Image (cartoon, coloured by chain):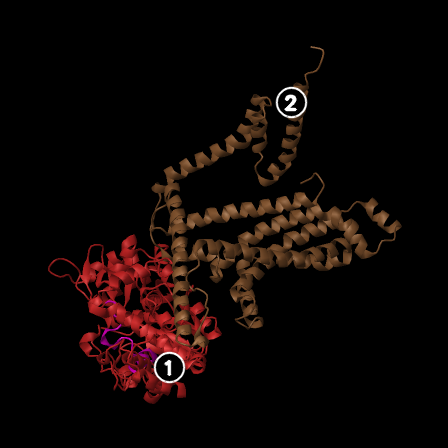
Chain colours: A brown, B red
């Protein structure tokens, strides 16, 4: 074989290209929490199946096995604990409630359609009777479905988190750049950081009720109260990490900025932000996690719409299905918390170029 | 007023029935009403689910509230347009006990519906003091005298005997106090500087939201409680307690919840108030019609998670006319929940006056008051005129029966005879002070509470 087979070459090349692609995609899989996809794809592409199998076992097999064991242990132990609401539900009962909640949502959707159909009939009748001024378009007033509650909670947490970020990042930059600002902010941070959301809640409720007196504004009061409570509690990780990131900029870079006679604004945008970004994102990730946790507590206590209210209402219902429904909510809250964290992680890897994630 | 008159004229001349909203010019048609998860919120759920609100052109959102305080603040602050309330709440708010606000009620929601439950342990200790019937079951009604030795016992051991009720001005607070006092136990007094209600008490009463009652008793924080359904039957189902008496046995057909709205709201939205009252009257009629034929359907509605949410069987127990005391001791109490019969929905002044006498009896109203004051206060809060106007519209539309409403009432029920009340003391709403003087335990005449002493 002296001449190289063109077919082989192109196959080799194709393979190499394929692996480059897989390795590229690996970065994204890591971000999305799908790291196990890489060895699976590599194995499919025919790269040393044995080594890949080990990776697959590590990245996919072990977690699945752990989840399986957890479910078995839960299923075995749950019926042994008798509460006043019956036995603690096992995985099967919880799964059943997932179906129930979905069926409820579907039923509520049907009721909503019926409501609008009735409204249309009424309005058509008014027009036919020559009373067009009596035609009314009103929104449906039924109960929020489980999906509505999830949506409400997510919108609230992002709104609160947004306010927190808008407040915390500039303050953090100020504290990082100037020793004076840092000295001024530090005691406040130390005092307010450990305060529980449940302590803020009554204060926030009173202030919002007093200041935001209109009931027909852009936001409902309950939404603002929940969001501001989230803000007050999720502010601190971003603030502290931003200050830390800004304060620990390479001294050489600072010298360079002096040599170039940069203005403050340019200095912040060209130099401070890029180098502090990884830490700022770390802060934001922590903040969003804290915010999500706080929100559920705030909704529970203030009876504001959202997953927290769902949990509390079910607890108060005290029916034989309540515990299972609460567990569905627990898993929902956990999964959404995990997804929020992943979203932040993805954003972070899009915006930063450093390796220290 | 003009619109109302023309509306009436129109209504009576119309030969065909349009939906009622054809006549009432609504000032506000999107309303939010609050409620607490109790079976007696049924008129609200029924008016919504049966489309009675929609028939009036009202778009109502019903919101469960965390507790009575939050609900009251909601109505005062305007987040809620109206709510299922404890009868004492509009009265207390109007006289300025607690949060001051003028709240009125055009519609009384129901009669009876409460019970007093004790934990299994207390029940075992009470049982030897209760006379039994021939079949060995306890003889009813059970007097608090059976509880007195148990309380004495706890006192000797230095353990405070705690019981729960749902709100300082709740029917449950007054019923529990009435029952305890009728059995010779001191439930404690309120005074302007001590609003705990535990001055000189043998039994210490504290506030717990209704749905948390069973859990709080299970945790051992309280030994018993007085609450509305389904939270007494829930204790039986969970096997954590035993109801000892229902309020029907304590005082036959006593008034329970009211529908409260802000006086300013009623002033600004007279037609909306009428429309709401109409829808609620229709719901109450539906709940009681054909000898409670619709109760099972009502129970199904209430058992949905957005309303009461407890299991169907638990709610059905009392709503369908039976009540379970000890496990297996099921007795017939057909009138446990009354929503329309016996003029249950008409806001009688005499009902309001009974609540005011109880506030005076336990010191929430600290100073002595004249009979006229009691009657005037009742008239400030209870508005039978609105009720009758709404009823008249329904009769004219052919949706209600003329004979079902007390058109000529002066707002006072006939005095409750002594055999209808557990301690045999009759009640006449026209003579509140004489009634107060006839009760053995409680403030009378010129008495006031100073420090921990009763003076005068």
Residue range (magenta): B336-356
Nearest the viewer among B14 and A254 is B14
Q: Which residue is drawn at the image coordinates 56% and 22% (left, top)?
A: A49
Nearest the viewer among B249 and B448 is B249
Q: Is residue B294 left or right of residue A117?
A: left
Q: Which chain carries label 2?
A: A
Quadrant for residue A160, please give it: bottom right
Mark 1 and mark 2 residues within 8 Å of each other at the beta carbon? no
The N terminus of chain B is located in which quarter? bottom left
| Residue B158 percent across, percent down from the top left | 35, 61
Q: Which residue is drawn at the image coordinates 19% and 58% (left, top)?
A: B330
Extreme residue toward the left, this view? B134
| Residue B48 percent across, percent down from the top left | 36, 67
Q: Can residue B111 be seen in this view?
A: no
Identify the mark at residue B395; answer none if there is no mark.
none
Quadrant for residue B426, please give it: bottom left
Identify the mark at residue B381; answer none if there is no mark.
1
How many marks the image carries: the answer is 2
Nearest the viewer among B337 and B10 is B10
Q: In this view, does A253 lie above or below A162?
A: above
Look at the image and say whether residue A122 sits in the magenta stretch: no
Look at the image and say whether residue B345 sits in the magenta stretch: yes
Identify the mark at residue A11; answer none if there is no mark.
2
Are there few (<14), some (14-19), or many (20+) residues within 10 Å of tag 2?
few
Q: Which element type, helix, strand or loop, lies under badge 2?
A: helix
Q: Which chain carries label 1?
A: B
| Residue A260 percent across, percent down from the top left | 88, 50
Q: Is residue B174 above or below residue B299?
A: below
The C terminus of chain B is located in which quarter? bottom left
Q: In this view, does A257 lie to the left or right of A331?
A: right
| Residue B232 percent across, percent down from the top left | 29, 61
């Amino acid at each position: 074989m002296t001449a190289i087979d063109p077919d082989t070459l192109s196959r080799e090349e194709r393979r190499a290209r394929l692996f480059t692609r897989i390795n590229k995609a690996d970065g994204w899989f890591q971000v999305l929490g799908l790291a196990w996809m890489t060895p699976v794809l590599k194995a499919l592409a025919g790269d040393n199946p044995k080594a890949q199998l080990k990776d697959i076992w590590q990245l996919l097999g072990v977690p699945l096995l752990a989840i399986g064991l957890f479910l078995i242990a839960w299923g075995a132990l749950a019926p042994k604990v008798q509460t006043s609401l019956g036995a603690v539900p096992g995985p099967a009962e919880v799964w059943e409630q997932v179906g129930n909640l979905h069926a409820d949502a579907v039923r509520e959707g049907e009721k909503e359609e019926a409501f609008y159909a009735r409204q249309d009939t009424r309005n058509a009748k008014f027009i036919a009777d020559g009373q067009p001024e009596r035609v009314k378009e009103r929104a449906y007033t039924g109960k929020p479905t489980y999906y509505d509650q999830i949506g409400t909670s997510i919108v609230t947490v992002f709104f609160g988190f947004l306010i927190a970020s808008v407040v915390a990042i500039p303050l953090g930059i100020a504290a990082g750049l100037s020793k004076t600002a840092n000295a001024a902010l530090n005691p406040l941070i130390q005092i307010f950081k450990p305060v529980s959301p449940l302590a803020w809640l009554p204060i926030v409720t009173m202030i919002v009720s007093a200041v935001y007196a209109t009931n027909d504004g852009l936001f409902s009061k309950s939404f603002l109260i929940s969001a501001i409570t989230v803000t007050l509690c999720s502010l601190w990780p971003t603030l502290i990490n931003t200050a830390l990131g800004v304060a620990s900029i390479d001294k050489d870079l600072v010298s360079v900025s002096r040599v170039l006679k940069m203005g403050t604004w340019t200095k912040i945008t060209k130099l401070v932000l890029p180098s502090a970004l990884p830490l700022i994102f770390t802060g934001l990730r922590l903040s969003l996690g804290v915010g999500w946790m706080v929100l559920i507590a705030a909704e529970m206590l203030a009876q504001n719409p959202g997953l927290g209210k769902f949990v509390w209402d079910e607890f108060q219902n005290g029916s034989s299905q309540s515990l299972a429904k609460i567990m569905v909510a627990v898993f929902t809250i956990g999964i959404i918390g995990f997804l929020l964290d992943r979203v932040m992680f993805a954003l972070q890897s899009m915006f930063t170029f450093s390796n220290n994630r | 007023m003009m619109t109302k008159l023309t509306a009436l004229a129109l209504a009576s001349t119309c030969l065909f029935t349009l939906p009622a909203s054809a006549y009432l010019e609504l000032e506000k048609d999107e309303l939010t009403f609050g409620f607490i998860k109790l079976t007696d919120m049924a008129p609200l759920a029924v008016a919504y689910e049966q489309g009675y609100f929609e028939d009036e052109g009202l778009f109502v959102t019903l919101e469960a509230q965390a507790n009575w305080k939050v609900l009251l603040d909601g109505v005062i602050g305007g987040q809620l347009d109206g709510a299922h309330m404890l009868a004492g709440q509009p009265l207390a708010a109007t006289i300025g006990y607690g949060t001051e606000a003028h709240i009125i009620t055009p519609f009384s929601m129901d009669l009876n519906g409460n019970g007093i439950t004790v934990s299994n342990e207390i029940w075992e200790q009470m049982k030897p003091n209760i006379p039994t019937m021939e079949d060995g079951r306890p003889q009813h009604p059970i007097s608090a005298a059976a509880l007195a030795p148990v309380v004495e016992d706890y006192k000797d051991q230095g353990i405070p005997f705690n019981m729960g009720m749902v709100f300082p001005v709740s029917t449950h607070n007054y019923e529990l106090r009435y029952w305890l006092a009728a059995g010779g136990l001191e439930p404690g007094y309120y005074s302007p500087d001590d609003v705990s209600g535990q001055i000189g008490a043998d039994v210490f009463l504290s506030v717990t939201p209704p749905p948390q009652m069973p859990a709080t008793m299970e945790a051992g924080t309280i030994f018993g409680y007085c609450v509305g359904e389904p939270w007494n039957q829930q204790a039986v189902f969970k096997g954590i307690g035993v109801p000892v008496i229902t309020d029907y046995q304590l005082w036959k057909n006593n008034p329970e919840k009211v529908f409260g709205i802000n006086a300013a709201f009623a002033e600004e939205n007279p037609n909306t108030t009428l429309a709401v009252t109409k829808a609620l009257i229709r719901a109450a009629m539906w709940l009681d019609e054909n000898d409670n034929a619709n109760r099972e359907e009502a129970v199904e509605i209430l058992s949905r998670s957005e309303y009461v949410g407890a299991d169907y069987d638990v709610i059905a127990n009392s709503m369908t006319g039976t009540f379970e005391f000890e496990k297996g001791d099921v007795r017939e109490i057909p009138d446990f929940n009354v929503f329309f019969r016996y003029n249950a929905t008409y806001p009688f002044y005499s009902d309001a006056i009974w609540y005011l006498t109880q506030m005076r009896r336990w010191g929430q109203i600290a100073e002595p008051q004249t009979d006229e004051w009691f009657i005037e206060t009742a008239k400030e809060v209870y508005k039978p005129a609105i009720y009758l106007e709404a009823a008249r519209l329904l009769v004219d539309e052919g949706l209600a029966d003329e004979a079902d409403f007390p058109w000529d009432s002066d707002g006072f029920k006939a005095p409750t005879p002594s055999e209808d009340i557990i301690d045999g003391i009759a009640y006449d709403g026209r003579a509140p002070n004489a009634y107060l003087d006839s009760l053995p335990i409680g403030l009378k005449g010129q008495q006031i509470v100073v420090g921990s002493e009763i003076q005068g």
